Amino acid sequence: MTDRGRQLSRRTLLAAGGAALAGLGCGGARAAKAKPIAVALVASVPIEQQWISRIHLALKAAQARGDITYAYSENVANTDAERVLREYAEGRKDLIIGEAFGLERPARRIAADYKSTAFLMGSSFPAQAPNLSVFDNYIQDASYLTGIVAGKETRTNIIGMVGGYAIPEVNRLMHAFMAGARSVNPDVKFLVSFINSWYDPPKAKETAFAMIERRADVLYAERFGVSDAAKERGVKAIGNVIDTAAQYPGTVIASALWHMEPTIDRAVAKVIEGSFTAEDYGPWSHMAKGGCSLAPLDPKLVPQPVIDLVLAKEKEIRGGSFTVAVNDSEPKSSA
């Protein structure tokens, strides 16, 4: 991924006209497919990166059930994305999944050329009829709950937050986390910084160190590297998307988890039954759909009264009596 490509938000990437394709009319009915269907994932970063690892895990589960055959390409440069996507389309894959960002423009262009192939794209833009659906990491419910833990656990009332890019997919989770912390601790302040990279653990670590120097005693680890800094300096960390508590025992005290299985399983089932159409899969990442959860809280690390408070709020979220606001604007430091 080029530096310029990394720095562009999804909205900027498609401003030149990709979004206009969303208005194309729907095609005819699709034919049902026999299992297993052929699925490919294209990613611009390593498969172990947080976002990609959750998609990969869900696809591996579908493969283990015998629903799909599965191939993937990782570390695909923006300049090579169109070739890789087109090769999979030419290879008669039934479902092609594009990760996000620099892959989005070529994915939309190729989907328009291969209307008999189903495409599922990580995107904050609309679906593109007739065959490109979109998904996103709407895990603000779980992020809000981890914010409650952080708001209760900070002693300095300063929380550091390190993100990749200030784009909607990152911003909304940070805002939800901040809202959860403020709900139980109105005195809490935040240090917010973006490293302008999706995978640069050393840079994230150094950014976190700087926040600890400014008295942050809880860190929101949106990127790899932050928890390493927390571990070295003896402060607490909050995980995002994946659970790294086992890798950072006593350091990572709560994590918001993304589960891509509801999204992937729905897309695969629709391809198999011949009913795949362009739609927004974003709601399938909500807690009510099983798309996100809070990692189990350890009473040795988080006091039981705080756990009880979190569980009570989780019950409200799942029951629909409390809705976590979605705020895609860039979060700012308040400390």
Image: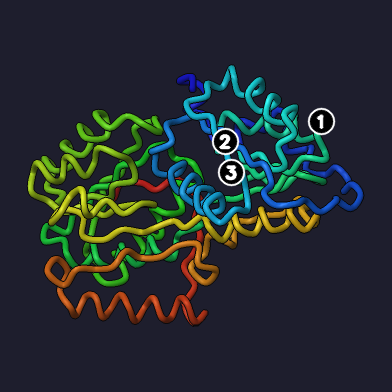
Q: Residue 183 in the image: state x and y as whole percent.
A: 32, 71
Mark 1 vs mark 3, foreground winner is 1
Give the labeled residue for mark 2. Answer: 71
Colour theme: rainbow
Seen from the viewer's position, the closer of residues 152 and 42 is 42
Q: Is residue 254 visible?
A: yes
Give the alpha-carbon distance from disc 3 to disc 2, as whole Å: 18 Å
Residue 113 is tagged as 1
Callout 3: SS: strand
Badge 2: few (under 14), some or many (20 or more) residues near its Cα, within 10 Å? some
Residue lying at 78% horizontally and 43% vertically, measured from the top left: 22
Mark 1 vs mark 2, foreground winner is 2
- Amino acid marked by disc 3: Gly
Q: Residue 151 in the image: state x and y as whole percent.
A: 23, 64
Give the labeled residue for mark 3. Answer: 122
Q: Earlier in the sequence, mark 1 or mark 2?
A: 2
Residue 299 in the figure: left or right of residue 115 = left
- Amino acid marked by disc 1: Asp
